[in-house]
């Protein structure tokens, strides 16, 4: 049985008719940039996020960059990010001229460890960027408490956890300004690049809509040195078609994850994902850990099962960040995760037999490798 890491088959089939209709309406409208579709999706996504506003932008990285920019974070500032996040979180900080300061995650949840944040705060610290990694909401009560006490902004990186919650509040509704990605493979994905910013602050919304559109509110009158970081009108129309299906697709991910966890918990040498008290997980990724990661990945590949590693090189060891001067051993938890994590196939429409088959292959591998366990 061949099982891809990710398949759009089922979800695309569900929406195909509606997407083609939306395309036709868009095509006939003759209005292709910043029109009614962007406005409509912004309203819908704000409502989904339980925030007053959403501002559509070009992608998740630009959303995070504009969120920092609009808070006036700049050269000389420091911004706290988790040591095990995707590089985009750190890049957004670097674009502003500020420096990303890495804080280690909890080894159980893979999300930033609130207990380690205070030690990283200096007089230059301006903001904390919690990342809801793999689909699990961070421990936002503890993080907001630190931010409020130390007078810091919070910018959630919500690229992976649309619809996850902490104490029943959704991701993207805690921070001052928050970035979300609609990259095709995310839980809510466009058919190309797309992103948004969520916030309750209407003054920031005006600044954001100016910045994303050449620093202009009125055509050909430019107030600031802005950017072209607009959400594409066609992608907005497609996102409006997909959003109503997201709750069902999330449930399908959660059901597949529950089955994985029940079948893999007893397999020796395999660590299954854990969710913190008060948090929910929408399983953008189902990530196990094992000391035999590379061998297990090869074994799954031989058995035609797609896997990926999120992420093989922590940011502090990336060539791009060599100038920060870190070396191996500086962030041991991030390094441990990079060496042991393996993401198994998960997507809406994955079938019970497919999950069972993956688990059987993992169990067979563990049996044949019992000398390690
Ligand atoms: C995908 C992702 C981003 C960037 O989103 P893009 O839309 O690809 O720019 C940022 N942060 C995290 C954690 C991501 O997974």
Image (tube, helix red, strand yellow):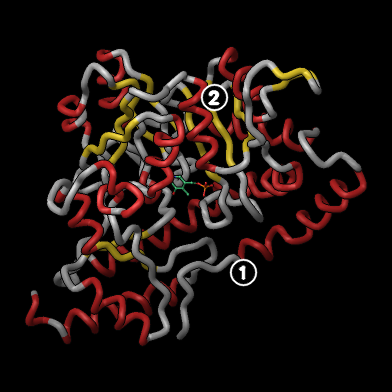
Task: Residue 300: tell me if it is visible.
Answer: yes
Q: Quadrant of residue 7?
A: bottom right
Please tell me which residue lies in front, 236 or 103: 103
Whether the residue carrying mark 2 lies under 8 Å from ligand 1 is answered with no
Q: Neighbour class for label 2 at 10 Å: few (<14), some, many (≥20)? A: some
Q: Position of residue 98 (x, y in %)?
A: 37, 29
Compare marks 1 and 2 and give the one earlier in the sequence: 1
The number of discs equals 2
Mark 2 lies on a secondary structure that is: loop
Q: Relative to 87, is 13 above or below?
A: below
Residue 171 is left or right of residue 315, and the answer is right
Query: Which quadrant does the C terminus fall into?
Result: bottom left
Please tell me which residue lies in front, 257 or 142: 142
Please tell me which residue lies in front, 325 or 365: 325
Q: Position of residue 228 (x, y in %)?
A: 66, 35
Q: Can you tell which mark lies on residue 9? A: 1
Task: Residue 275: tell me if it is visible.
Answer: no
Q: Position of residue 63 (x, y in %)?
A: 53, 35
Q: Position of residue 104 (x, y in %)?
A: 21, 41
Q: Residue at x 39, y 71 (%)?
A: 307
Q: Residue at x 53, y 42 (%)?
A: 60
Q: Residue at x 36, y 46 (%)?
A: 133
């Amino acid at each position: 049985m061949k099982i891809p890491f990710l398949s759009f088959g089922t979800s695309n089939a569900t929406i195909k008719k509606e997407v083609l209709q939306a395309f036709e309406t868009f095509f006939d409208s003759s209005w292709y940039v910043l029109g009614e579709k962007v406005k409509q999706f912004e309203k819908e996504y704000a409502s989904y996020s339980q925030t007053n506003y959403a501002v559509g932008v070009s992608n998740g990285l630009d959303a995070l960059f504009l969120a920092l920019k609009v808070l006036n974070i700049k050269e000389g500032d420091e911004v706290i990010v988790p040591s095990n996040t995707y590089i985009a979180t750190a890049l957004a900080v670097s674009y502003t001229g500020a420096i990303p300061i890495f804080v280690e995650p909890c080894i159980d949840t893979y999300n930033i460890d609130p207990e380690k944040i205070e030690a990283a705060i200096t007089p230059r610290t301006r903001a904390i960027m919690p990342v809801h990694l793999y689909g699990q909401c961070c421990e936002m009560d503890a993080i907001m408490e630190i931010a409020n006490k130390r007078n810091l902004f919070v910018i959630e990186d919500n690229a992976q956890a649309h619809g996850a919650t902490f104490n029943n509040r959704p991701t993207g509704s805690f921070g001052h300004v928050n970035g979300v990605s609609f990259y095709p493979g995310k839980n809510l994905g466009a058919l190309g690049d797309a992103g948004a910013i969520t916030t309750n602050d209407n003054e920031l919304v005006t600044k954001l809509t100016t910045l994303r559109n050449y620093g202009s509110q009125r055509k050909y009158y430019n107030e600031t040195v802005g950017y072209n970081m607009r959400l594409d009108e066609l992608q907005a129309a497609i996102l409006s078609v997909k959003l109503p299906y997201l709750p069902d697709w999330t449930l399908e991910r959660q059901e597949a994850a529950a089955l994985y966890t029940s079948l893999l918990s007893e397999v020796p040498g395999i660590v299954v994902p854990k969710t913190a008290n008060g948090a929910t997980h929408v399983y953008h990724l189902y990530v196990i850990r094992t000391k035999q990661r590379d061998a297990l990945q090869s074994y799954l590949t031989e058995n035609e099962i797609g896997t990926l590693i999120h992420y093989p090189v922590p940011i502090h060891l990336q060539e791009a960040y060599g100038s920060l001067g870190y070396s191996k051993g500086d962030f041991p938890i991030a390094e441990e995760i990079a060496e042991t994590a393996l993401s198994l196939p998960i997507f809406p429409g994955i079938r019970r037999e497919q999950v069972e088959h993956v688990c059987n292959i993992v169990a067979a591998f563990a049996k044949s490798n019992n000398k390690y366990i």
